[in-house]
Image (cartoon, rainbow, N blue to C red):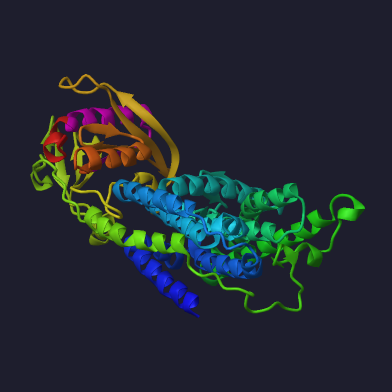
């Protein structure tokens, strides 16, 4: 009884300390689970992992009581990763840090062998972590193209005249925009998570399990393409309203259940594939195990293990480790930085080398999301048709949820889609010898096209890689006590009859002109 009470009290302390340290990252995680259809499966992952650990309780109770002090080293590694995530403003790194800490706690409580027993449930928790924003945007964009192509193929297969231009499906009088929500990623992520779970309970050879997991990708892509084709048929028969509202939602749920059904059928087929001796029914293929790995009978199991683990010295030391670390986390989050003085963007010049600017305010809802400290948004003209849009967002101190983020996640919106993303380089102004580099994105919406140049000005560096931005945030926070910086974005519309080369020259000329002005507002 005393050991149970000690385990309960120490576990409550662990939950309290971890909840305090990872409060921001957990809030972000829950917002994705409950606020995004793409990650709505995440809320079930901890429950499933907990159930799988519960299924292993008898096997754990029969292991020798040998707790591992190596768990403290793993926890220490997780806490070091916490510092990296905090200073680099990456929620992904913070989520991984928490997972490493949980693995270390498991090692101190049930030992290395016990952790091996519950290795899959612990690893399964990783499927609840949202993808990095820029990786998610690239994946969704590619899936949109595949889904659009497959949708057109399905329409043409049933005799409907359809053509694709980017992510727009042309049905003649009606054009369907395959937006990010229709990319199929909201099927791919939960279906892959389900495939992993199915592979875990799948009593088959390793190669069959791997095939089952990997098949979730083509299943979700092809089924989503079929779904888009079905929407096109409904639009052809009943008008554009058939693609919205109930039909869209109903088709989404139905298609996901069809995908899951195909996964189950694949398990049954794989189970019968091979020699006569290896063939099993689906009921025989799906089994739970307990004790020493023996299969659990389907008529029930004992509710409680024969022995309850008591918290040993290794586990109690790990709990004690969190108290000073929580204090250190507070100091880290409340750290003071020393960025140099700068001019406010309200004084940013509206005349630059013959370019006349007209500033205008950003909508409050965007300001609330971006959380910058200062910004400028203006249209600059040089002549009647020469126009460039300038946007610069400045952050005095970049923290979690308040840092310059990649435009790749916001450029696709309002019907605009990224057609290509490359890098551009051109000579700088006379004051510097280094050439200017920027990411170059071509975005399209129907017949309209824009070219966007953007880069990150982080202290004296001009960076195009989101990964390098995070690295220098970490380095400068330690070495210079500075994380100030800005995102610089230029955009220009490609007018009818105008070449992309002409627009590139216009943007690069304006970028060279504005470069000398930025240093006063985004200091080196």
> Would you place residue 131 above or below residue 354 in this image?
below
Q: Which residue: 19% across, 31% down? A: 515
Give the image quarter of residue 451: top left
Q: Residue 436: where, in percent of width, then height?
A: 27, 26
Q: Residue 197: where, in percent of width, then height?
A: 64, 60
Question: Could you tell me if residue 412 is visible in this image?
Answer: no
The magenta region covers 486-515
Q: Residue 408: where, in percent of width, then height?
A: 39, 45
Give the image quarter of residue 115: bottom right
As drawn, is 373 to the left or to the right of 125? Answer: left
> Would you place residue 83 above or below residue 290 in this image?
above
Between residue 370 and residue 421, name the one nearer to us. 370
Instruction: Give the residue furthest to the right.
Output: 276
Q: Which residue: 22% across, 52% down? A: 372
Q: Is residue 491 magenta?
A: yes
Between residue 74 and residue 164, name the one nearer to us. 74
Q: Which residue: 18% across, 29% down? A: 513
> Would you place residue 309 above or below residue 394 in this image?
below
Q: Is residue 364 magenta?
A: no
How many discs appear?
A: 0
Between residue 164 and residue 507, name the one nearer to us. 507
As drawn, is 133 to the left or to the right of 60? Answer: left
Question: Could you tell me if residue 322 is visible in this image?
Answer: yes
Q: Which residue: 16% across, 39% down? A: 522
Q: Residue 473: where, in percent of width, then height?
A: 28, 41
Instruction: Tell me the quarter of the image containing the C terminus.
Output: top left
């Amino acid at each position: 009884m005393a050991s149970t009470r000690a385990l309960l009290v120490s576990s409550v302390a662990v939950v309290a300390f971890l909840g305090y340290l990872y409060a921001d990252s957990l809030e972000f995680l829950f917002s994705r689970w409950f606020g995004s259809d793409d990650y709505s499966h995440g809320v079930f992952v901890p429950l499933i992992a907990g159930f799988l650990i519960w299924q292993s309780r008898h096997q754990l109770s029969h292991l020798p009581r040998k707790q591992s002090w190596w768990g403290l080293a793993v926890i220490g590694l997780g806490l070091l990763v916490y510092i990296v995530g905090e200073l680099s403003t990456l929620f992904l790194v913070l989520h991984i840090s928490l997972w490493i800490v949980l693995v270390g706690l498991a090692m101190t409580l049930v030992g290395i062998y016990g952790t091996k027993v519950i290795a899959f449930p612990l690893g399964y928790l990783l499927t609840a972590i949202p993808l990095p924003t820029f990786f998610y945007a690239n994946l969704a964009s590619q899936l949109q193209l595949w889904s659009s192509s497959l949708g057109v193929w399905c329409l043409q297969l049933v005799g409907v005249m359809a053509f694709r231009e980017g992510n727009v499906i042309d049905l003649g009088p009606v054009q369907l925009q395959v937006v990010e929500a229709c990319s199929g990623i909201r099927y791919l992520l939960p279906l892959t998570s389900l495939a992993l779970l199915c592979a875990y309970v799948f009593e088959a050879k390793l190669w069959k399990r791997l095939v089952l997991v990997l098949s979730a990708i083509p299943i979700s892509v092809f089924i989503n393409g079929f779904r888009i084709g079905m929407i096109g048929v409904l639009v052809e028969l009943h008008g554009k309203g058939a693609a919205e509202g109930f039909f869209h939602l109903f088709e989404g749920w139905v298609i996901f259940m069809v995908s899951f059904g195909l996964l189950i059928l694949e398990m049954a087929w794989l189970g019968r594939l091979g020699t006569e001796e290896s063939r099993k029914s689906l009921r025989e293929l799906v089994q739970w195990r307990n004790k020493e790995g023996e299969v659990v009978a389907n008529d029930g199991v004992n509710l409680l293990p024969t022995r309850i683990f008591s918290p040993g010295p290794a586990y109690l030391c790990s709990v004690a480790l969190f108290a000073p670390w929580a204090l250190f986390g507070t100091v880290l989050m409340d750290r003071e930085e020393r960025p140099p003085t700068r001019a406010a963007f309200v004084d940013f010049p509206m005349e630059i080398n013959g370019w006349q600017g007209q500033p205008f305010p950003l909508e409050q809802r965007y300001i609330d999301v971006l959380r910058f400290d200062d910004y400028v948004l203006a249209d600059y003209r040089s002549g009647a048709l020469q126009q460039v849009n300038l946007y610069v967002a400045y952050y005095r101190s970049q923290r979690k949820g308040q840092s310059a983020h990649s435009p790749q996640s916001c450029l696709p919106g309002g019907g605009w889609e990224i057609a290509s993303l490359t890098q551009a380089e051109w000579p700088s102004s006379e004051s510097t010898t280094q050439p200017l580099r920027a990411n170059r994105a071509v975005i399209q919406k129907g017949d309209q096209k824009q070219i966007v140049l953007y880069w990150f000005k982080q202290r004296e560096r001009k960076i195009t890689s989101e990964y390098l931005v995070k690295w220098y945030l970490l380095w400068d926070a330690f070495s210079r006590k500075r994380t100030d910086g800005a995102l610089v974005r230029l955009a220009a519309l490609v007018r009818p009859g105008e070449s992309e080369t002409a627009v590139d020259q216009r943007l690069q000329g304006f970028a060279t002109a504005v470069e000398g002005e930025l240093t006063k507002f985004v200091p080196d």
